[in-house]
Amino acid sequence: MRSTRQRISTWFLEGIRRSQRPEGHQDSWWNVMCLTGVDYFSSLSYAPGIAFLAAGLLSPLATVILVLLTLFGALPVYCRVAQRSPHGQGSIAMLERLLPGWRGKLFVLCLLGFAATDFIITITLSAADAATHLVQNPLIHNSLRPFLVDHRMAVTIIMLTVLGGIFLKGFREAISIAVILVWFYLGLSSVVVITGMCHLSSNWWMVKDWWHQLFIAHGSIWSMLGISCLLFPKLALGLSGFETGVAVMPLVKGDANDNEQHPEGRVRNTKRLLAAAAIIMSLFLLASSISTSILIPPQQFEPGGEANGRAIAYLAHKYLGSGFGTAYDVSTVLILWFAGASAMTGLLSLVPKYLPRYGMAPDWAKARRPLVTFYTLVSFAVTFIFHADVDAQGSAYATGVLVLMTSAAIASLLSVSKESLLKRLAFLGITFVFCYTTIANTIERPDGIKIASFFILVILVTSFASRIARSTELRIHRTVLDDQAKEFIDNASRKVVRLVAHRPGQINYEVKAAEAANNHNIAQDEIIFVEVRISDASDFDDDVLDVSGEKVGQYKVLKCSSTAVPNALAALMLYLRNQTHQIPHLYLGWTEGNPIVYILKYLFWGEGETAPVTREILRKAEPNPNKRPKVHVG
């Protein structure tokens, strides 16, 4: 029984001892496109209906504006993002480099809040929409329909559970399922859209009548285009796939000779993925918008109408019969259910790249399966909070998508600041359009920013709580001494290694040595000073603590830099114990002032209550007091 529990624990926590990255399984770009496409392409199920409700008969023209923004705005932006962040960090990493320290960390946490809003709501909204499509199928027997309506929440939860189970199994299984679902759905959608366009071509009077109604309502083509430009932000859900397209980059197979730091093959193939997905989606958006706007009576788009949220499915039933229509409903339900797969992949890619590095996530966040379990439970909670209602979640979804795309546009604009004027003007224009779209959507649907703010608040609170809880971890993975430092230690280890902490910049070693000798009753010639300079206190881990030795007059000084003084001192002491096979001694002074203030100073600026914190770090790292380096305070 115990070995079984151990095997389950090992399987569940696989990856916790190393940085978990989805690169473990990579696939061709067209297969990975299907993984991001289950989110992107599934929006076809509701995009034409949203477009008509937002723009009415103008929806095809508003869709043209959306397609132009997709191909000449979003696509160039995300190709740039893919080039600058080839490991799936997205625009967040590009902006993080511009804002060092705590400002950058807080900015990243806010963007992660929007990303969590986007990805979590993608998972829950898509599952809820799949359940809604299942309920609305005309062939569902009347006796079964009330059961499904009453238990739509349970149906949604079951779908979320199965999705989480697939990701517990692995990425390979998720990609295989995505490929089947995407081509099945796109194949059936092609049949429906082509049938609709053929019907319009044989009934050309319907197109003329639509065009005539537009001129009666708006007067001129310029008026139509102007109104369409104002209305198209309401159609922005059709842009949802780009962020996940970049997030799944680590799964894209590159060239055999790719450099891990600059994988040119992976970047090139990801650009192909983004371009192919954008072109396919643009063609479907245009064709479906035209056919549904003209062929479906306007009242059917309204809430309660047969085309509400399922315009293409309505055409499938009307022109191809209930058998094909039901097959199309099945494909829609499946791809909507699995749309959360690309969002889950995005979360599994983003979170381990940031929060553990900031010390703002527990150690198990490095492993994939605990994260999948956590995200699935969060999805359950969100589904219960919103009662599996698609409309209630739509505003949060749009807000998350647009804020991330705007941040990507800003990051791309900043990245071309030293390039040609034409390129700078082009990205400036794209950024302006995305800013306008985000602002217009926020004004139109303010609930989205409220829900996103809740996600941001949760991330901030849990992140800082985790950082506080992990503050006494060792945090340094390896210690390296240069030749001079090794010589100091080798000579000192013939007796006892005694280090005296000294604040960098205070060069009066003679006074400090006399003070240490008096307070601690040690010989001055045994003293080795150690100075730790703070690098970036907002960071958490130090991969390597590089210690250099320097002779200042007659005094020996060890110098290093780290994110926190106590953690660096503890790591150095443990290293010296292991190398010299004797217990080293560290001498520090008490701080003067309110200890609470100094603890907060340590948490945020890496220095403060150095003596007790160093001792606590050593106590946790070495439980045996007989083997623990000694800390003296005077």
Image (tube, helix red, strand yellow):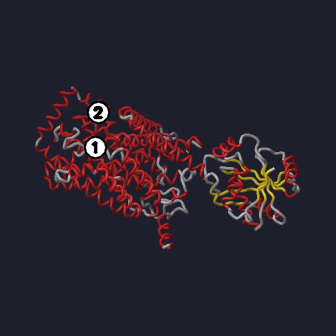
- The amino acid beneath tag 1 is Ala
Q: Residue at x 77, y 66 (%)?
A: 582
Q: Secondary structure at mark 1?
A: helix
Q: Residue at x 48, y 61 (%)?
A: 258
Which residue is the site of mark 1? Answer: 47
Q: Is residue 500 visible?
A: yes
- The amino acid beneath tag 2 is Ser
User: Which quadrant of the view contains residue 453?
Assistant: top left
User: Which quadrant of the view contains residue 220?
Assistant: top left
Say few, some or many: other residues with alpha carbon within 10 Å of mark 2 (under 14 / 14 to 19 / 20 or more): many
Say whether marks 1 and 2 touch (CB < 8 Å): no
Tell me residue 238's x, y (percent). 32, 44
Tell me residue 119's x, y (percent). 40, 49
Q: Secondary structure at mark 2?
A: helix
Tell me residue 326's x, y (percent). 19, 54
Residue 256 vs 509, above or below: the answer is below
Cα separation between marks 1 and 2: 16 Å
Tell me residue 246's x, y (percent). 42, 51
State left or right for residue 95 relative to residue 184: right
Which residue is the site of mark 2? Answer: 228
Nearest to the eye among marks 1 and 2: give it: 1
State left or right for residue 504 relative to residue 621: right
Q: Residue at x 43, y 55 (%)?
A: 249
Return the residue nearer the eye: 606 or 61: 606
In the orientation shown, which residue stands out farthest toward the top? 219
Say few, some or many: other residues with alpha carbon within 10 Å of mark 1 (under 14 / 14 to 19 / 20 or more): many
State left or right for residue 606 relative to residue 531: left
Q: Is residue 325 visible?
A: no
Return the residue nearer the eye: 440 or 487: 440
Q: Earlier in the sequence, mark 1 or mark 2?
A: 1
Residue 436 vs 134, above or below: the answer is above
